Image (cartoon, rainbow, N blue to C red):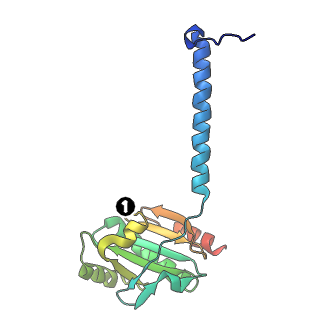
């Protein structure tokens, strides 16, 4: 004997809400699991190569097996200016063990302004101009300053948006060095 199915109209309202709540909960959990799995994949850094202002050619591939700090900035950015002394201190402390590269965004400031900025602040780590914003686009940089930390295998450890101070730099650099 086949039993007739209840029509949705015949189900009491509290049972409808209960069923809808379960459907919503299961959908939400499925979405959360999907997002978690997607974020658990390690992102490998995109290539970076080009002529630096004062240190010759930089190629990320030249630093395989070495952690890397990539800092995106531009000269007329007050927060960028504020963090530069701490980046220089970090370079002096970690520069033997971590490759540093500054990437000047070229939208509103000229290459000449970048060179003057570097000289004025006494920066000694390699810096290159990002003509055409190719590196910025590859790393999906939307605000400045942004600092990207790469592990030895060049997987992305952390993307830090906004000013980073000396203590925070030390923590992040120690982490990618495994200290």
Residue 179's quadrant in the figure? bottom right
The answer to whether residue 82 shows anywhere in this view is no
Quarter of the image that includes the N terminus: top right
Q: x%, y% of residue 103?
A: 38, 75
Query: Compared with residue 27, is residue 39 higher up or lower down, i.e. above or below?
Result: below
From the viewer's side, name the closer residue of 135 and 173.
Answer: 135
Instruction: Decide: few, some or many residues near mark 1? Use Cα within 10 Å; few <14, some 14-19, many ≥20.
Output: few
Image point (62%, 33%), residue name: 26
Residue in the picture at 61% in, 21% down: 19
Residue 176 sits in quarter: bottom right
Q: Which residue is mark 1?
A: 143
Vertical placement of 32 versus 120: above or below? above
Q: Residue at x 36, y 72 (%)?
A: 134
Left or right of 32: which side holds 82?
left
Q: Going by the image, does 155 lie left or right of 83?
A: right
Residue positioned most to the front: 1
User: How many numbered marks does the figure carry?
Assistant: 1
- Pinpoint residue 163: horizontal percent, then vertical percent: 42, 64
Q: Position of residue 162 (x, y in %)?
A: 42, 61
**Residue 174, horizontal then vertical, whole percent:** 61, 72
Q: Element at badge 1?
A: loop
Look at 37% across and 90% down and name the residue there.
Answer: 54
In-front residue for pair 152/10? 10
- Which residue, as the protein is rendered here, is positioned at the far right? 1
- Taking depth in this image into account, of 100 and 170 the one nearest to the observer is 100
For the question of whether residue 6 can be seen, the reply is: yes
């Amino acid at each position: 004997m086949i039993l007739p199915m209840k029509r949705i109209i015949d189900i009491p309202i509290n049972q409808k809400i209960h069923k809808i709540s379960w459907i919503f909960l299961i959908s939400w959990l499925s979405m959360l699991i999907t997002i978690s799995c997607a974020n658990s994949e390690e992102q490998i850094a995109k290539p970076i190569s080009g002529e630096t202002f004062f240190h010759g050619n930089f190629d990320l591939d030249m630093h395989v097996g070495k952690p890397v700090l990539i800092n995106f900035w531009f000269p007329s950015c007050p927060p960028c200016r504020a963090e530069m002394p701490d980046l220089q201190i970090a370079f002096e402390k970690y520069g033997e063990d971590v490759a540093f590269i500054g990437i000047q965004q070229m939208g509103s400031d000229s290459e000449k302004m970048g060179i003057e900025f570097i000289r004025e602040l006494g920066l000694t780590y390699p810096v290159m101009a990002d003509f055409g914003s190719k590196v910025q686009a590859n790393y999906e940089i939307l605000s400045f300053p942004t600092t990207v930390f790469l592990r030895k295998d060049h997987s992305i450890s952390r993307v830090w948006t906004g000013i980073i101070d000396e203590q925070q730099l030390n923590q992040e650099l120690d982490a990618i060095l495994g200290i």
